[in-house]
Image (cartoon, grey):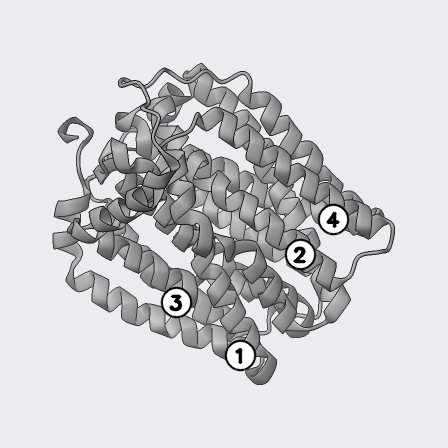
Amino acid sequence: MAEISGIGAIGRVLKNRNYRNYTAGNFSSQLGMWVQRIAIGWLTWELTKDPKWLGIIAFADFMPNLVFAPLAGALADRVDRLRAIRLYMMISACLSGAIAWLTIADLITVEYLLVLVLANGIAMSFNYPVRLSIIHGLVGRESLTTAISINAIVFNIARIGGPAMAGAVINFWGIGPAVTITVVADIAFVLALYRVAMAPPKEPRIKKSARNIPAEIMEGFRYVAGHPGLGPLLFLLAFYSIFGRPFIDLFPGFADEIFGRGAEALAMLTSVLGVGSFVGSIFLARINGVSGLTRILIANILLMSVAVIAFTSTDIFWVALICTFFAGIAIVMIGVIEQTLLQASVDSAMRGRVLSFYTLIARGCPSLGALLMGYLASFYGLQLPVAAGAMLCIGLWFWARRRQDALGKSLEVTPDSG
């Protein structure tokens, strides 16, 4: 079983100055990201009043991961990771600035928004594998669960605060000023990264020809396919990401059509999801090591499925908020444990590529799911497609539960063993 060590594990990781500076900047970036996500979701709904467009915009944001993540992973194993993150975040800030200006100038259309969201999705598809793989270099293998969980805590504090901030700014000043917050937040992250110093690699990075990149990508695929735990772990994530998680991207439609409460309800749903995720993150941050994480992961697939089914079965807002809270716990548990088990069981030379497959699935597959759910919702309403997807995830839980012990043996690698 995983060792529960209390706040000592959290304090030990936060004493690391480089990780602390990174986390401060990351919090700024995540806060801005959540403000923008709410603003863009509500802007899309105001422009179209069509759940299909909610799915299309979500697809444009996440879909580039399906195309570029393998290339991004190969590059992540080659480049200076700090410089790469700074570059990608500055590109993202410029694109967010364009959305803000067009909105304030009343020139925005859903087509312009689609193009800019797609461009930002491309930049982020290169950013995320680097951003994930840098954690190991900051804290080492023995503190991975705690460090990744702290990242999740930061993410979910931002998920609570960001929507609340977005709701207030949108109500008082409009969508354009809300998106401007994202620009400032991204620049703050870039500045924080200048206060992070990475230790030089144990072995000097060898310059390789760009012609080797396709072979390196295929090497990553072969590595995952040949590993007894990584392939099934990524399959679990892909299935859940397509059929379970996309209900979040349809929150604007639920807030307006099902609960009849507008942008305020959208902010509340997103914030309560963040509260649940925060609770789950705190629990995981207290864990040392990786033993027992597979069992917790599989149990939370069931929790998420039941919570989403209950969410779609009610039009009572406070009941939906309770369901959203438990879904938030499950979603963060699944995400943090997936990342931890991947990083614990992967060879260091393959880390960027394997984590790029994680981001491909974790960001790309929800976009496919959102597109599918949004399309079906335009014919059958919002509730039925989302409930059907959650029922399929209960079937996934049965499949995974039968393989739990074998997966644990191949994935729960202790730090000393690798």
Q: Amino acid at mark 1?
A: Leu
**Image spot of residue 325 (x, y percent):** 49, 55
Q: Amino acid at mark 3?
A: Val
What is the C-alpha distance between the residues marked 3 and 1? 21 Å
Residue bearing the label numbered 4: 99
Q: Quadrant of residue 416?
A: top left
Residue bearing the label numbered 1: 376
Tell which of 78 and 383 is nearer to you: 78
Residue bearing the label numbered 2: 115
Q: Residues within 10 Å of mark 1 (few under 14, many from 20)?
A: some
Q: Quadrant of the C terminus?
A: top left
What is the C-alpha distance between the residues marked 4 and 3? 37 Å
What is the C-alpha distance between the residues marked 4 and 1? 28 Å
Which of labels 3 and 1 is toward the front?
1
Which of labels 4 and 3 is toward the front?
4
What is the C-alpha distance between the residues marked 2 and 1? 23 Å
Q: Which mark is residue 333?
A: none
Q: Earlier in the sequence, mark 3 or mark 1?
A: 3
Residue 275 relative to residue 111: left or right: left
Look at 30% across and 36% down and name the residue there. 351
Residue bearing the label numbered 3: 306
What is the C-alpha distance between the residues marked 3 and 2? 36 Å
